[in-house]
Amino acid sequence: MGNGVTVTTVTPKRMAMPFSVPSFKRGFPNKSSKGGFSMSQKMWAGRFTKEVDERVNDFNSSIKFDARMYKQDISGSIAHATMLGECGIIEKSESEAIVKGLREILDDIQSGKLGFDPNAEDIHMFVEAELTKRLGDTGKRLHTARSRNDQVALDVRMTLLDETAEIKAMLKKLTQTVVDIAKKHTLTVMPGYTHLQRAQPITFAHHLMAYANMFIRDLGRLEDTAKRMNKMPLGSGALAGTTYPINRQRVCELLGFDEITQNSLDGVSDRDFCIELCSTLSMLMMHLSRFSEEIILWCSWEFKFVELDDAYATGSSIMPQKKNPDVTELIRGKTGRVYGDLMTLLTMMKGIPLAYNKDMQEDKEAIFDAIDTVKLCLVTFDPMLATMRVIPENMRAAAAKGFINATDCADYLVKKGMPFRDAYKITGTLVHTCIEKGCTLETLGLDEYKKLSDSFDEDVFEAISLDTCVMQRKSAGGPAPEAVKEQINYVENALENFR
Ligand code: ARG
């Protein structure tokens, strides 16, 4: 995507508010005034003898949520009109007037001079009606060799490509934040958990890099989803192409798509790309939610591994001591919303026959909600993480309890020639002794060790020290600082390769 005809994509400047649609109000009749599109103004009015019931009008209208595609709609129309002129389907002069008119409409929307009519059926009808208002009969030629079915398919693809690129940039930034924190904590020992029970010692960097890897996969999925999205459907017509000598390849080129869609029925009725994106976003939310859940635990007094910056926590209305991790809880909560959006899309599509059906208008609210939710979460999670204070002493103190060096104690015996199962049993007995005596493996006397096996020597204490346990776990992918540095290199390289 992106060349001469494509109007500027949504700028990431307005990150605090993931999307914004210019005003609906200015210069338009009030909704209750029965103004707006009367039957005689409806583009498809010829076939009908009665006004559409106002409730049906409202029910049918999608302008409230598809107006946000105005840039894409206008870019698509500019490319279409250009091609119509080049192919001699409309006069060159008319094509030029249409392109100029569309550019002016875009400017007027962006400057706030032109607001959306809440009574318009959708953004496509709105732009065309506005063009016709400005150009008269010439405006009426824009829709030659086109249907709203291929038009909306184009607009949604273009919008989602822009949104996917934005989300990718935000996720890349977050991944870099994770890596930057990891770089500072390759020596910060913490307990690793299974079943939320202290299991084996790791480092905070090692733990963080697990999330960096999840995000790299998310980025890969976003990129892959965008590849299948990047196909140009215009020219599919309502469902069966067109008899006009159009040049779809030219429109594809003008809009900067990779290629055209290959079948007109599929071109207008495919929404796989919405579902794929929503599924990718669901997975990303699942990762953010797991990360959030850990941060919630870590900032409890029971753990106190981290402390959130005051700017990213909230207080209680009644309990003066409280500092709550609301951001992370909201992310965990909002994950359900995105899963719901995915379910909406899958269910919407499962029973509809080819080709276009109005059910498909429901795609936008669901996928836009998923997109906006993910952007809100990313925009908040990143600085919250970047400003979070890590408390290495508490991580280390937690790692020193819970016998997380028991495996290493058993491994010590194995290295002295004992079969692992026997070593496991002896170590279990040692742990039992420690619990009875209220001490740890490090503070238990050597005599107690000797009682169970002659293989134990003074050097066992070195072998089970927390630092040794971490430093010796040098296997690829493991927590030893050099292994984690490899992981950091891998992720930073991968980040560079995502466009
Ligand atoms: N607003 C419609 C949508 O979002 C545009 C396509 C309308 N097509 C039609 N045949 N009624 O799907």
Image: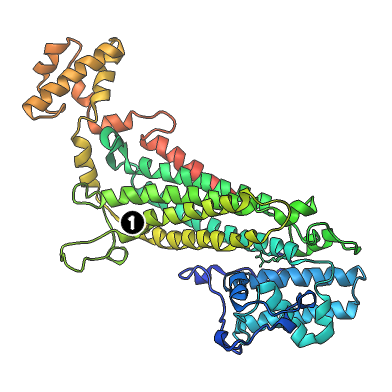
Residue 155 image-quadrant placement? bottom right
Q: Is residue 489 left or right of residue 52?
A: left
Out of 169 and 482, give the one closest to the viewer: 169
Q: Is residue 141 left or right of residue 287?
A: right
Q: Is residue 483 left or right of residue 324?
A: right
Please say if 34 is above or below 168: below
| Residue occupying image coordinates x 50% and y 67% | 18
Q: Is residue 93 left or right of residue 2?
A: right
| Res. 312 in view | yes
The C terminus sits in image quarter: bottom right
Amino acid type shown at disc 1? Glu
| Residue occupying image coordinates x 32% and y 32% | 471
Out of 281 and 141, give the one closest to the viewer: 141
Count of numbered tags: 1
Please say if 406 is above or below 86: above
What residue does disc 1 label? 329
Judging from the image, the colouring scheme is rainbow
Residue 402 image-quadrant placement? top left
Out of 25 and 405, give the one closest to the viewer: 25
How far across and down, in percent of the image, does residue 261 sit? 77, 53
| Residue occupying image coordinates x 25% and y 60% | 324
Q: Residue furthest left?
A: 437
- For ligand 1, give the image quadrant: bottom right
Out of 61 and 100, give the one closest to the viewer: 61
How far across and down, in percent of the image, does residue 209 sit? 41, 43
How far across and down, in percent of the image, does residue 32 sit? 55, 86
Please say if 425 is above or below 155: above
